[in-house]
Image (cartoon, grey):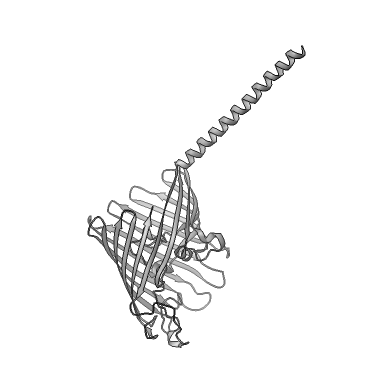
Amino acid sequence: MKTKNSVFFSNKAFILISFICFSSYAQEEESKSTVKEILSKVSISGSVDGYYRYNFNSPNKAMDVDNDPTTENTFIAPNTFFANQSGFALGMANVIFNYDSEKVGFVADLVFGPRGEDAVFNSSGSAQTINQLYVYWNVTQKIKLTLGNFNTYIGNELVSPTGNFNYSTSYMFTYGPLAHTGLKADFVIDKKWSAMLAVMNPSDYTENNPFDTYIIGGQLGYTIDNGNAFLNFRYGNEGEPGKVGPTLQVDLTTGWDINDDFYLGVNTTYSSTEPQESGDTSGFYGFALYPQYKTSEKFSIGLRGEYFSVYNRGLTSVIGLNDKGDGDVIAATLTGSYTIENLIIKPELRLDTTSENSFIDNDKKATKNLSSFVLGAIYKF
């Protein structure tokens, strides 16, 4: 009987071990299958860029202006983002991970380099590598909720150089919001109309909210086959209560394919900040045209003509201002775009002319004009 019991228990142990091994194997295969299914829905894209910059009538190196008060708040490059360093300079490396299922998904958009650092200037630590980081839920076919950090919906330009025709950026883009963190809801009204509502941290405070104040954002969109138009706004306290008043910005962005070869974009914006006590509102406004002409499958040429104005010291250390705190700039940027497979070469001529002295010339004197050349190179994948 002892021998039979041993055989019996051995058989039971063998069956139990076999069952455990089979279950573990099945779970492992199921786990691998799940991972493969998830990875099959993850796409990876991005870009790498750099540039060369040369000033024609301004120094191409940092200069000591001998503490001359007439050269205070003057610059040797346009005071806009991303292409203001002389000589050969770096842009950024950008890697975007996008998971998209029928109902839910996420975007993790990472940036490395000076362009990325400028884009997330109010972040600190590891968050300086994050351009966008959000999750979304397609509640229905007409309602989408997004929570996290996303690029601004205001204006005609983007942080990524692949989304812009011109390599350098405009004043309106530079001094409008770049990014938001919050909750937004996108609505499809019909085949042509859309809308968006959002509750967000103060603009560009993407990592957290240090002020316990929030802004409201909104957008009304109209899209047809040959173009679109978006009316955007944001309102709220963009800083610590008691130190700054609420800001209102209204922005219109539109672009149309006039024919197969000619495109015309328009952007206009107005931003005002209320005073804390007595006084007038302050802010800025601007207008820009973006005509672009496609000469062949590989080459296009485009112009950005921008007028930008600051009033009542709404922005300081941007352009020269008069005694009333007013100043304006006209910036004309002519850009060529030549495509070689995934590589885009962008030669660019730019002329900035201000109402007050805003730049330094080669004789170390303050001047109203600056002319420059930029050669950008972008590889996208």
Looking at the picture, tell me which residue is in the foreground, 99 or 35. 35
x, y percentage for residue 291? 27, 64
Q: Is residue 208 visible?
A: no
Report whether 316 appears left or right of 28: left
Compared with residue 185, is residue 292 higher up or lower down, i.e. above or below? below
| Residue 138 drawn above or below residue 50 | above
Is residue 98 found left or right of 343 in the rendered image? right
Position of 77 relative to 48 (above/below): below
- The residue located at (45%, 52%) in the rendering is 96
Query: Camera-side residue: 23 or 281?
Result: 23
Residue 212 spot, x, y in % from top left:
58, 63
Relative to 245, say whether 155 is above or below: above
Residue at (44%, 71%) from the top-left corner? 272
Can you see residue 242? yes
Give the tally of numbered discs: 0
Furthest-front residue in this view: 3
Location of residue 84 in the rendering, given as x and y in whole percent from the top left corner: 40, 71
**Residue 380 appears in which quarter of the rendering?**
bottom left
Image-based side of 318 in relation to 333, left or right: right
